[in-house]
Image: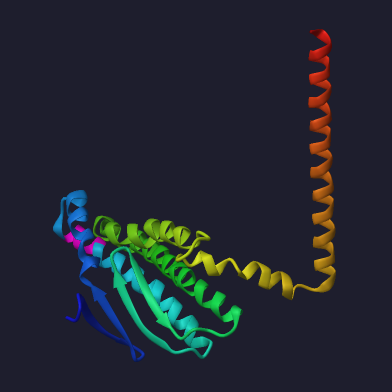
Amino acid sequence: MTLGFWQLGRWMGVPVALHWSALLPFGWCLLHRQNVLAALSSVLAFLVLMAVHELGHAVAARSRGLDVIGIRLYLLHGVCEVEAPEREEDDVFIAWGGVLAQLCLFVAALLVLQAASALLPGSAPVLQPVLFVFLHANIVIAALNLFPMAPLDGHRAWRVLPLLWRAAPPRLQALGRGLGRAVDIHRRRRIEKTSHAAANELLDRLRKK
C-alpha cells in the first residue's frame, strides 16, 4: 500500500491501483441493503464498473498507439492516465472509450439476466445487487460522464460532432448550411412578428387611455 493505494495488479503491463476511499460506499450499502453479502456484492460490482470504464479508455488509447501509464480507482470515479494525444480525433476517441466499455458491460449483464431468469429462476435475489449496478447504475453513470463539462468525459467526447461535420461530404454540408439559414430566417420573422404584435397592443392600450 503506497500513499493510500492498494496495487491490484497489472492489465497488459498497466498498473491498476485502488484508493482506500473506494471502499467507503460499503457502509452506505450495508445500511441500505441490510445484508453484508449484498452490500459487499454491490461495492465490488461498482468497482468492476469503474474499472471497466477506465479500461475502455486504456483500450482506446492503446488502439491509437498511445502509452497507458496507469489506472487508479477512487471514491465514485476512476482515472486512466494516458500519453497526451497529438490529434484531436484521438483525444475524442479515447473519451468515448469509457462509455462504450460500459455499454458492452450493460449488454453482457442483460444477457446474463435473461439466461439466469430462464435457467435459474431462483437466482434473481442473489444476482440482484450486481445486476442493479451493471444495469441501472451503469446507465446513470454513463449519462453523467457524457455531460459536457470538464473534467467529465463529455467535455471532450462531444467534440465528435464538429469532427463529423468537417468530415461530411460537401453536398451534405451545403444542405446543412441551407437548413441553418432557413431556420434563422424563420426565427427572425417570428421575432419581428411578435415585436410588431406587442407594439400594436401597446398602441391600442394607449389609445384607449
Q: Residue 115's x, y, as percent?
A: 37, 64
**Is-magenta flag for residue 40?**
yes
Write the start and end of the magenta stretch as one range: 37-42
Q: Residue 31's x, y, as percent?
A: 17, 50
The foreground one among 209 and 74 is 209
**The C terminus - image quarter:** top right
Q: How many marks?
A: 0
From this view, report whether residue 115 is shown above or below residue 94: above
- Type of colouring: rainbow
From this view, report whether residue 101 is shown above or below residue 29: below
Q: Quadrant of residue 58?
A: bottom left
Secondary structure mostly seen in the magenta stretch: helix
Q: Residue at x 40, y 80 (%)?
A: 81
Q: Residue 37's x, y, as percent?
A: 16, 61
Q: Residue at x 16, y 50 (%)?
A: 34
- Taking 24 as reference, is 54 left or right? right
Residue furthest top as drawn: 209
Q: Quadrant of residue 186?
A: top right
Q: Residue 194's x, y, as percent?
A: 79, 32
**Is-magenta flag for residue 2?**
no
**The N terminus - image quarter:** bottom left
From this view, report whether residue 14 is shown above or below residue 154: below
Q: Residue at x 47, y 87 (%)?
A: 62
- Taking 56 as reference, is 161 left or right? right
- Taking 95 as reference, is 20 left or right? left
Q: Residue at x 33, y 60 (%)?
A: 133
- Taking 89 as reference, is 21 left or right? left
